[in-house]
Amino acid sequence: MDEVPFAPKFDDAVYRRVRTAFEAGGPGGGAEALRAELESTGEFQALFYALLLSRRVELGLSPFPLSPATELPPDAHEAYEDAIRRAARHVGGLHLGRGEIAKAWAYFRIINEPGPVKDALLAHTPGPDDDIYPLVEIAWQQGVLPEKGFDLILDRSGVCSAITMVGSADLNANPTLRDYCVKRLVRALHAQLKDRLAGDLAQRGVSFAEGATIPRMLADHPEVMADDAYHIDTSHLSSVVLAAMQLPRCVELDLARELARYGTLLSTNYTGDNDPPFEKTYADYLPYLNAVAGVDVDANVAHFTAKLPAAAVEGYRFPAEVVVNLLVKLDRLPEALAVAREFLADAAEGGTSCPGVMELARRTADYDALAAQAMAKDDPVSYLAALIAAQSGKA
Protein backbone atom coordinates (compact mmCIF):
# COMPACT_ATOMS: atom_id res chain seq x y z
CA MET A 1 0.00 0.00 0.00
CA ASP A 2 1.34 3.43 -0.96
CA GLU A 3 1.98 5.84 1.88
CA VAL A 4 -0.31 8.80 2.16
CA PRO A 5 1.79 11.91 1.56
CA PHE A 6 2.11 14.29 4.50
CA ALA A 7 -0.31 17.19 4.17
CA PRO A 8 0.72 20.15 6.35
CA LYS A 9 -2.07 21.93 8.21
CA PHE A 10 -0.55 25.36 7.66
CA ASP A 11 0.87 26.91 4.55
CA ASP A 12 4.20 28.74 4.53
CA ALA A 13 2.45 32.09 4.90
CA VAL A 14 1.44 31.21 8.44
CA TYR A 15 5.02 30.54 9.45
CA ARG A 16 6.17 33.75 7.77
CA ARG A 17 3.57 35.79 9.67
CA VAL A 18 4.55 34.23 12.99
CA ARG A 19 8.24 34.84 12.28
CA THR A 20 7.60 38.45 11.23
CA ALA A 21 5.60 39.06 14.42
CA PHE A 22 8.35 37.48 16.51
CA GLU A 23 11.07 39.61 14.88
CA ALA A 24 9.01 42.77 15.38
CA GLY A 25 7.60 42.14 18.83
CA GLY A 26 9.73 39.43 20.42
CA PRO A 27 8.29 36.34 22.10
CA GLY A 28 5.11 38.17 23.08
CA GLY A 29 4.46 39.36 19.53
CA GLY A 30 5.16 35.92 18.11
CA ALA A 31 2.88 34.26 20.68
CA GLU A 32 0.03 36.67 19.95
CA ALA A 33 0.35 36.09 16.21
CA LEU A 34 0.43 32.32 16.69
CA ARG A 35 -2.62 32.50 18.94
CA ALA A 36 -4.57 34.41 16.30
CA GLU A 37 -3.56 31.96 13.56
CA LEU A 38 -4.54 28.90 15.62
CA GLU A 39 -7.87 30.34 16.71
CA SER A 40 -8.80 31.35 13.16
CA THR A 41 -8.00 27.89 11.80
CA GLY A 42 -9.66 26.00 14.65
CA GLU A 43 -6.46 24.21 15.70
CA PHE A 44 -7.41 24.34 19.37
CA GLN A 45 -5.12 21.61 20.66
CA ALA A 46 -2.11 23.46 19.32
CA LEU A 47 -3.60 26.67 20.71
CA PHE A 48 -3.67 25.17 24.22
CA TYR A 49 0.04 24.41 24.07
CA ALA A 50 0.80 27.78 22.49
CA LEU A 51 -0.86 29.55 25.41
CA LEU A 52 1.26 27.56 27.84
CA LEU A 53 4.41 28.28 25.82
CA SER A 54 3.67 31.99 26.07
CA ARG A 55 3.25 31.79 29.83
CA ARG A 56 6.44 29.77 30.29
CA VAL A 57 8.39 32.48 28.49
CA GLU A 58 6.75 35.20 30.60
CA LEU A 59 7.85 33.33 33.73
CA GLY A 60 11.44 33.09 32.50
CA LEU A 61 11.23 29.33 31.91
CA SER A 62 12.32 27.27 28.95
CA PRO A 63 9.90 27.58 26.01
CA PHE A 64 9.93 23.76 25.90
CA PRO A 65 7.91 21.75 28.46
CA LEU A 66 10.94 19.83 29.72
CA SER A 67 9.38 18.65 32.98
CA PRO A 68 5.97 18.26 34.64
CA ALA A 69 4.40 21.38 36.10
CA THR A 70 4.96 19.98 39.60
CA GLU A 71 8.72 20.10 39.04
CA LEU A 72 8.89 23.78 38.09
CA PRO A 73 10.68 26.21 40.41
CA PRO A 74 8.53 26.89 43.49
CA ASP A 75 8.10 30.57 42.64
CA ALA A 76 6.67 29.70 39.20
CA HIS A 77 4.51 26.76 40.18
CA GLU A 78 1.32 28.57 41.19
CA ALA A 79 1.45 30.99 38.24
CA TYR A 80 1.93 28.16 35.76
CA GLU A 81 -0.88 26.10 37.28
CA ASP A 82 -3.12 29.14 36.86
CA ALA A 83 -2.00 29.39 33.23
CA ILE A 84 -3.04 25.78 32.66
CA ARG A 85 -6.48 26.53 34.11
CA ARG A 86 -6.87 29.65 31.99
CA ALA A 87 -5.76 27.88 28.82
CA ALA A 88 -8.06 24.93 29.46
CA ARG A 89 -11.04 27.21 30.09
CA HIS A 90 -10.30 29.23 26.96
CA VAL A 91 -9.80 26.28 24.63
CA GLY A 92 -12.63 24.29 26.21
CA GLY A 93 -14.90 27.29 25.79
CA LEU A 94 -13.98 27.57 22.12
CA HIS A 95 -14.94 23.93 21.60
CA LEU A 96 -18.24 24.47 23.41
CA GLY A 97 -18.92 27.45 21.17
CA ARG A 98 -18.73 25.06 18.23
CA GLY A 99 -20.91 22.43 19.89
CA GLU A 100 -17.94 20.08 20.39
CA ILE A 101 -18.81 18.87 23.86
CA ALA A 102 -16.57 15.80 23.91
CA LYS A 103 -13.54 17.82 22.81
CA ALA A 104 -14.32 20.51 25.36
CA TRP A 105 -14.49 17.91 28.14
CA ALA A 106 -10.87 16.92 27.45
CA TYR A 107 -9.84 20.37 28.72
CA PHE A 108 -12.35 20.97 31.51
CA ARG A 109 -11.64 17.50 32.85
CA ILE A 110 -7.95 18.16 33.43
CA ILE A 111 -8.78 21.14 35.65
CA ASN A 112 -11.71 19.38 37.36
CA GLU A 113 -14.29 21.95 36.27
CA PRO A 114 -17.26 19.99 34.88
CA GLY A 115 -19.74 22.86 35.21
CA PRO A 116 -19.54 24.31 31.67
CA VAL A 117 -19.76 20.83 30.12
CA LYS A 118 -22.68 19.93 32.38
CA ASP A 119 -24.51 23.07 31.25
CA ALA A 120 -23.77 22.26 27.62
CA LEU A 121 -25.05 18.70 28.00
CA LEU A 122 -28.20 19.93 29.66
CA ALA A 123 -28.96 22.26 26.76
CA HIS A 124 -27.90 19.88 23.98
CA THR A 125 -30.35 18.01 21.77
CA PRO A 126 -28.51 15.67 19.39
CA GLY A 127 -29.65 15.35 15.81
CA PRO A 128 -31.03 12.04 14.51
CA ASP A 129 -27.73 11.12 12.88
CA ASP A 130 -25.43 12.34 15.65
CA ASP A 131 -23.29 9.83 17.52
CA ILE A 132 -24.56 10.03 21.09
CA TYR A 133 -22.12 7.60 22.66
CA PRO A 134 -19.25 10.03 23.33
CA LEU A 135 -21.79 12.17 25.19
CA VAL A 136 -23.14 9.14 27.07
CA GLU A 137 -19.57 8.30 28.11
CA ILE A 138 -19.09 11.79 29.55
CA ALA A 139 -22.54 12.16 31.06
CA TRP A 140 -23.08 8.66 32.49
CA GLN A 141 -19.80 6.80 32.86
CA GLN A 142 -17.82 9.85 33.97
CA GLY A 143 -20.68 11.23 36.05
CA VAL A 144 -20.88 14.74 34.62
CA LEU A 145 -24.66 14.58 34.16
CA PRO A 146 -25.82 10.95 34.44
CA GLU A 147 -29.50 11.82 34.01
CA LYS A 148 -28.69 13.18 30.54
CA GLY A 149 -26.73 10.06 29.67
CA PHE A 150 -29.70 7.93 30.65
CA ASP A 151 -32.09 10.13 28.68
CA LEU A 152 -29.93 9.85 25.57
CA ILE A 153 -29.95 6.06 25.72
CA LEU A 154 -33.66 5.75 26.51
CA ASP A 155 -34.73 8.24 23.85
CA ARG A 156 -32.40 6.97 21.13
CA SER A 157 -32.02 3.24 21.84
CA GLY A 158 -35.22 2.42 23.71
CA VAL A 159 -36.37 0.70 26.87
CA CYS A 160 -34.26 -2.45 26.46
CA SER A 161 -30.95 -0.58 26.31
CA ALA A 162 -32.01 1.72 29.15
CA ILE A 163 -32.88 -1.26 31.37
CA THR A 164 -29.49 -2.79 30.62
CA MET A 165 -27.80 0.53 31.45
CA VAL A 166 -29.49 0.74 34.85
CA GLY A 167 -29.01 -2.94 35.58
CA SER A 168 -25.28 -2.77 34.96
CA ALA A 169 -24.78 0.09 37.43
CA ASP A 170 -25.05 0.07 41.21
CA LEU A 171 -27.37 3.01 41.74
CA ASN A 172 -28.29 2.27 45.35
CA ALA A 173 -25.56 4.65 46.47
CA ASN A 174 -27.30 7.38 44.46
CA PRO A 175 -31.02 7.01 45.16
CA THR A 176 -31.87 10.31 43.48
CA LEU A 177 -30.40 9.13 40.18
CA ARG A 178 -31.88 5.64 40.67
CA ASP A 179 -35.38 7.04 41.15
CA TYR A 180 -34.98 9.37 38.18
CA CYS A 181 -34.09 6.47 35.89
CA VAL A 182 -36.81 4.18 37.25
CA LYS A 183 -39.46 6.87 36.91
CA ARG A 184 -38.52 7.47 33.28
CA LEU A 185 -38.55 3.73 32.58
CA VAL A 186 -41.98 3.37 34.15
CA ARG A 187 -43.37 6.25 32.10
CA ALA A 188 -41.83 4.94 28.87
CA LEU A 189 -43.09 1.39 29.31
CA HIS A 190 -46.52 2.56 30.49
CA ALA A 191 -46.89 4.77 27.40
CA GLN A 192 -45.79 1.87 25.19
CA LEU A 193 -48.32 -0.51 26.75
CA LYS A 194 -51.16 1.99 26.57
CA ASP A 195 -50.41 2.73 22.92
CA ARG A 196 -50.33 -0.94 22.00
CA LEU A 197 -53.52 -1.77 23.89
CA ALA A 198 -55.23 1.10 22.08
CA GLY A 199 -53.94 -0.25 18.78
CA ASP A 200 -55.19 -3.74 19.60
CA LEU A 201 -58.65 -2.42 20.39
CA ALA A 202 -58.71 -0.28 17.27
CA GLN A 203 -57.88 -3.31 15.14
CA ARG A 204 -60.82 -5.12 16.73
CA GLY A 205 -63.08 -2.21 15.79
CA VAL A 206 -63.62 -1.34 19.43
CA SER A 207 -63.98 2.29 20.43
CA PHE A 208 -62.81 3.48 23.81
CA ALA A 209 -63.13 6.71 25.69
CA GLU A 210 -60.51 9.38 25.14
CA GLY A 211 -58.01 9.19 27.98
CA ALA A 212 -59.09 5.71 29.05
CA THR A 213 -56.64 4.20 31.51
CA ILE A 214 -54.98 0.81 31.13
CA PRO A 215 -57.08 -0.74 33.96
CA ARG A 216 -60.25 0.61 32.30
CA MET A 217 -59.30 -0.84 28.91
CA LEU A 218 -58.54 -4.21 30.48
CA ALA A 219 -61.72 -4.26 32.58
CA ASP A 220 -63.98 -3.29 29.67
CA HIS A 221 -62.28 -5.52 27.12
CA PRO A 222 -60.82 -8.65 28.74
CA GLU A 223 -60.68 -10.25 25.31
CA VAL A 224 -57.40 -8.45 24.61
CA MET A 225 -55.69 -10.84 27.03
CA ALA A 226 -57.17 -14.03 25.56
CA ASP A 227 -55.11 -16.74 23.88
CA ASP A 228 -51.89 -16.01 25.77
CA ALA A 229 -51.80 -12.48 24.38
CA TYR A 230 -49.19 -9.92 25.41
CA HIS A 231 -48.49 -6.45 24.14
CA ILE A 232 -45.00 -5.56 25.39
CA ASP A 233 -41.83 -7.48 26.05
CA THR A 234 -42.53 -9.43 29.22
CA SER A 235 -38.91 -9.28 30.39
CA HIS A 236 -39.07 -5.49 30.17
CA LEU A 237 -42.31 -5.55 32.16
CA SER A 238 -40.89 -7.63 35.00
CA SER A 239 -37.66 -5.60 35.14
CA VAL A 240 -39.44 -2.27 35.32
CA VAL A 241 -42.06 -3.38 37.87
CA LEU A 242 -39.34 -4.82 40.10
CA ALA A 243 -37.34 -1.61 39.86
CA ALA A 244 -40.45 0.41 40.71
CA MET A 245 -40.57 -1.27 44.13
CA GLN A 246 -37.78 1.10 45.14
CA LEU A 247 -39.86 4.18 44.41
CA PRO A 248 -41.55 6.27 47.10
CA ARG A 249 -45.19 7.21 46.74
CA CYS A 250 -45.41 9.20 43.50
CA VAL A 251 -47.25 9.39 40.17
CA GLU A 252 -44.85 6.89 38.61
CA LEU A 253 -45.59 4.40 41.39
CA ASP A 254 -49.25 4.52 40.38
CA LEU A 255 -48.28 3.91 36.76
CA ALA A 256 -46.17 0.94 37.89
CA ARG A 257 -49.21 -0.43 39.72
CA GLU A 258 -51.08 -0.35 36.41
CA LEU A 259 -48.21 -2.23 34.78
CA ALA A 260 -48.31 -4.82 37.56
CA ARG A 261 -52.08 -5.13 37.19
CA TYR A 262 -51.55 -5.89 33.51
CA GLY A 263 -48.95 -8.48 34.51
CA THR A 264 -51.48 -10.33 36.68
CA LEU A 265 -53.52 -10.98 33.54
CA LEU A 266 -50.67 -12.52 31.56
CA SER A 267 -50.55 -16.23 30.91
CA THR A 268 -48.35 -18.14 33.36
CA ASN A 269 -46.25 -19.02 30.31
CA TYR A 270 -44.86 -15.49 30.58
CA THR A 271 -44.52 -15.10 34.33
CA GLY A 272 -42.48 -18.13 35.38
CA ASP A 273 -41.65 -19.23 38.90
CA ASN A 274 -39.99 -16.92 41.41
CA ASP A 275 -38.55 -17.26 44.89
CA PRO A 276 -40.49 -16.23 47.99
CA PRO A 277 -42.05 -13.83 48.71
CA PHE A 278 -42.82 -13.18 45.04
CA GLU A 279 -43.73 -16.74 44.03
CA LYS A 280 -46.79 -15.57 42.12
CA THR A 281 -44.87 -12.82 40.34
CA TYR A 282 -47.25 -9.95 39.59
CA ALA A 283 -49.85 -11.20 42.04
CA ASP A 284 -47.18 -10.56 44.68
CA TYR A 285 -45.59 -7.50 43.10
CA LEU A 286 -48.93 -5.69 43.07
CA PRO A 287 -49.65 -5.93 46.84
CA TYR A 288 -46.18 -4.52 47.56
CA LEU A 289 -46.71 -1.55 45.23
CA ASN A 290 -50.23 -1.03 46.59
CA ALA A 291 -48.97 -0.94 50.17
CA VAL A 292 -46.35 1.69 49.31
CA ALA A 293 -49.05 3.67 47.51
CA GLY A 294 -51.18 3.63 50.67
CA VAL A 295 -53.84 1.29 49.28
CA ASP A 296 -55.20 -1.34 51.73
CA VAL A 297 -51.93 -1.09 53.59
CA ASP A 298 -52.69 -3.46 56.45
CA ALA A 299 -54.06 -6.17 54.17
CA ASN A 300 -51.14 -5.90 51.77
CA VAL A 301 -48.56 -5.98 54.57
CA ALA A 302 -50.34 -9.04 55.98
CA HIS A 303 -50.08 -10.64 52.52
CA PHE A 304 -46.32 -10.78 53.04
CA THR A 305 -46.06 -11.32 56.79
CA ALA A 306 -48.21 -14.44 56.39
CA LYS A 307 -45.44 -15.96 54.26
CA LEU A 308 -42.68 -15.53 56.85
CA PRO A 309 -43.10 -18.58 59.10
CA ALA A 310 -43.10 -21.05 56.20
CA ALA A 311 -40.22 -19.22 54.52
CA ALA A 312 -38.19 -19.37 57.73
CA VAL A 313 -38.75 -23.15 57.97
CA GLU A 314 -37.46 -23.49 54.40
CA GLY A 315 -34.44 -21.37 55.24
CA TYR A 316 -35.47 -18.35 53.16
CA ARG A 317 -34.36 -15.09 54.78
CA PHE A 318 -35.19 -12.77 51.88
CA PRO A 319 -38.97 -12.64 52.54
CA ALA A 320 -38.31 -11.18 55.99
CA GLU A 321 -35.94 -8.65 54.45
CA VAL A 322 -38.67 -7.63 52.00
CA VAL A 323 -41.16 -7.15 54.84
CA VAL A 324 -38.69 -5.12 56.90
CA ASN A 325 -37.91 -2.86 53.95
CA LEU A 326 -41.61 -2.42 53.23
CA LEU A 327 -42.36 -1.50 56.84
CA VAL A 328 -39.44 0.94 56.90
CA LYS A 329 -40.75 2.52 53.69
CA LEU A 330 -44.14 2.85 55.39
CA ASP A 331 -42.46 4.42 58.46
CA ARG A 332 -43.65 1.56 60.68
CA LEU A 333 -40.33 1.08 62.39
CA PRO A 334 -41.46 -0.71 65.57
CA GLU A 335 -43.15 -3.36 63.42
CA ALA A 336 -40.03 -3.61 61.26
CA LEU A 337 -37.97 -4.16 64.41
CA ALA A 338 -40.33 -6.87 65.62
CA VAL A 339 -40.06 -8.73 62.29
CA ALA A 340 -36.29 -8.38 62.25
CA ARG A 341 -35.97 -9.68 65.82
CA GLU A 342 -38.13 -12.69 65.03
CA PHE A 343 -36.74 -13.67 61.65
CA LEU A 344 -33.36 -11.94 61.19
CA ALA A 345 -31.83 -12.00 64.68
CA ASP A 346 -29.08 -14.37 63.58
CA ALA A 347 -28.12 -12.31 60.53
CA ALA A 348 -24.89 -10.34 60.56
CA GLU A 349 -25.48 -6.63 61.02
CA GLY A 350 -25.11 -5.11 57.56
CA GLY A 351 -25.33 -8.54 55.96
CA THR A 352 -28.91 -8.19 54.76
CA SER A 353 -30.67 -6.09 52.14
CA CYS A 354 -32.62 -4.34 54.91
CA PRO A 355 -31.70 -2.56 58.15
CA GLY A 356 -30.70 -5.08 60.83
CA VAL A 357 -31.98 -5.50 64.37
CA MET A 358 -29.43 -3.18 65.96
CA GLU A 359 -29.94 -0.45 63.37
CA LEU A 360 -33.71 -0.60 63.79
CA ALA A 361 -33.37 -0.64 67.58
CA ARG A 362 -31.22 2.50 67.39
CA ARG A 363 -33.72 4.22 65.11
CA THR A 364 -36.62 3.42 67.44
CA ALA A 365 -34.62 4.13 70.61
CA ASP A 366 -35.49 0.62 71.82
CA TYR A 367 -32.38 0.19 73.96
CA ASP A 368 -33.62 -2.97 75.63
CA ALA A 369 -33.84 -4.62 72.23
CA LEU A 370 -30.43 -3.21 71.37
CA ALA A 371 -28.88 -4.62 74.53
CA ALA A 372 -30.56 -7.99 74.06
CA GLN A 373 -29.30 -8.25 70.50
CA ALA A 374 -25.79 -7.30 71.60
CA MET A 375 -25.84 -10.07 74.19
CA ALA A 376 -27.14 -12.56 71.62
CA LYS A 377 -24.28 -11.58 69.31
CA ASP A 378 -21.76 -11.76 72.18
CA ASP A 379 -20.88 -8.10 71.60
CA PRO A 380 -20.10 -6.48 74.96
CA VAL A 381 -19.06 -3.20 73.35
CA SER A 382 -22.48 -2.70 71.74
CA TYR A 383 -24.09 -3.92 74.97
CA LEU A 384 -22.41 -1.16 76.95
CA ALA A 385 -23.23 1.35 74.20
CA ALA A 386 -26.90 0.39 74.57
CA LEU A 387 -26.78 0.94 78.33
CA ILE A 388 -25.13 4.33 77.89
CA ALA A 389 -27.59 5.33 75.18
CA ALA A 390 -30.54 4.30 77.36
CA GLN A 391 -29.20 6.49 80.19
CA SER A 392 -28.30 9.49 78.05
CA GLY A 393 -31.01 9.22 75.42
CA LYS A 394 -28.41 9.57 72.67
CA ALA A 395 -28.42 6.68 70.23
Image: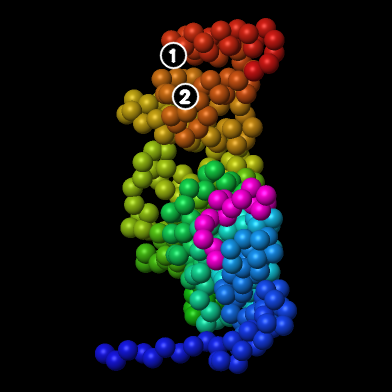
Q: Would you say 379 lies left or right of 60 here? A: left
Q: Is residue 213 in view?
A: no
Q: Earlier in the sequence, mark 2 or mark 1?
A: 2
Q: Where does the image place residue 204, in percent across and percent down from the top left?
A: 49, 78
As displayed, is residue 32 above or below residue 259? below
For the N terminus, give its image quadrant: bottom left
SS class of the residue under badge 2? loop
Q: Would you say 235 lies left or right of 240 here? A: left
Q: Residue at the location (44% across, 65% down)?
A: 160
Residue linked to disc 2: 349
Q: Where does the image place residue 262, in percent across and percent down from the top left?
A: 49, 58
SS class of the residue under badge 1? loop
Q: Is residue 100 magenta?
A: no
Q: Nearer the viewer, residue 197 or 363?
A: 363
Q: Residue at the location (58% across, 19% down)?
A: 361
Q: Which residues are magenta?
A: 64-78
Q: CB of mark 2 within 8 Å of CB of mark 1?
A: yes
Tell me the quarter of the picture where residue 251 sits.
bottom right
Q: Amino acid at mark 2?
A: Glu
Q: Amino acid at mark 1?
A: Lys
